[in-house]
Image (cartoon, rainbow, N blue to C red):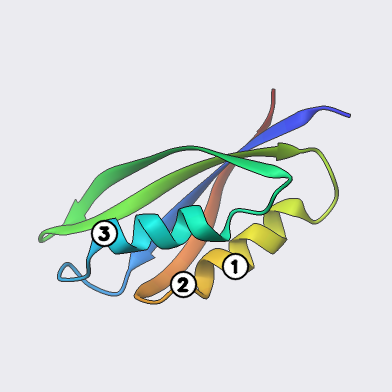
């Protein structure tokens, strides 16, 4: 079974939210069968920044959806979107 790289776009509730706290919370919810590869801040508009979160996990059905749901439950996160899925 191969590995999959998934990139999620995580939008905070506003430009005043602590991105470092959100990043820490993201790292804390990553399951044991996955690896947090990187988190990048991407400017959106008017001081708002989105986080692009790249996670690598084993290729299994439902893996991306489970992580997306966990990310959306993090405090100060408005929305989560899967923007890329690719085999490694």
21 is higher (above) or lower (below) than 55: below
- Circle 3 is placed at which residue position? 19
Figure quadrant of the C terminus: top right
Q: Nearer the viewer, residue 18 or 4?
A: 18
Q: Residue furthest left?
A: 46
Given contact means CB atoms under 8 Å apart, are the residues at marks 2 and 1 in contact? yes
Return the residue at label 2.
74
Q: Would you place residue 48 above or below residue 5 in this image?
A: below
Q: Quadrant of residue 59?
A: top right
| Residue at the image point whose x is 48% and y is 52% from the top | 27
Q: Residue at x 46, y 46 (%)?
A: 53
Cα separation between marks 2 and 3: 12 Å
Give the numbered dot on residue 70. Answer: 1
Name above or below for residue 85 compared with residue 19.
Answer: above
Instruction: For marks 2 and 1, give the CA distance.
Output: 7 Å
- Along the polypeptide, which appears first: circle 2 or circle 3? 3
SS class, disc 2: loop
Q: Report x, y in % for residue 46.
A: 10, 61
- Asked if the residues shown at circle 2 and circle 3 are in contact, with their CB atoms under 8 angstroms apart, the answer is no
Viewed as shown, does residue 29 lie left or right of 21? right
In this picture, residue 61 sits left or right of residue 19: right
Snapshot quadrant of residue 19: bottom left
Q: Is residue 2 above or below residue 45?
A: above
Q: Is residue 50 left or right of residue 56?
A: left
Outermost residue on the right side: it is: 1
> Is disc 3 placed on a helix, strand or loop?
helix
> What crowding class fits label 3: few (fewer than 14 Cα within 10 Å), some (14-19), or many (20 or more)?
some
Q: CA separation, marks 1 and 3?
A: 17 Å
Q: Which residue does the image show at 38% across and 57% down from the upper left?
A: 24
């Amino acid at each position: 079974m191969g590995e999959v790289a998934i990139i999620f776009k995580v939008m905070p509730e506003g430009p005043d939210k602590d991105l470092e706290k959100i990043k820490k919370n993201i790292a804390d919810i990553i399951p044991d069968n996955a690896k947090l590869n990187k988190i990048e801040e991407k400017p959106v508009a008017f001081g708002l920044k989105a986080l692009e979160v790249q996670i690598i996990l084993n290729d299994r059905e439902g893996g991306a959806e489970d992580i997306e749901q966990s990310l959306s439950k993090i405090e100060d996160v408005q929305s989560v979107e899967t923007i890329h899925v690719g085999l490694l």
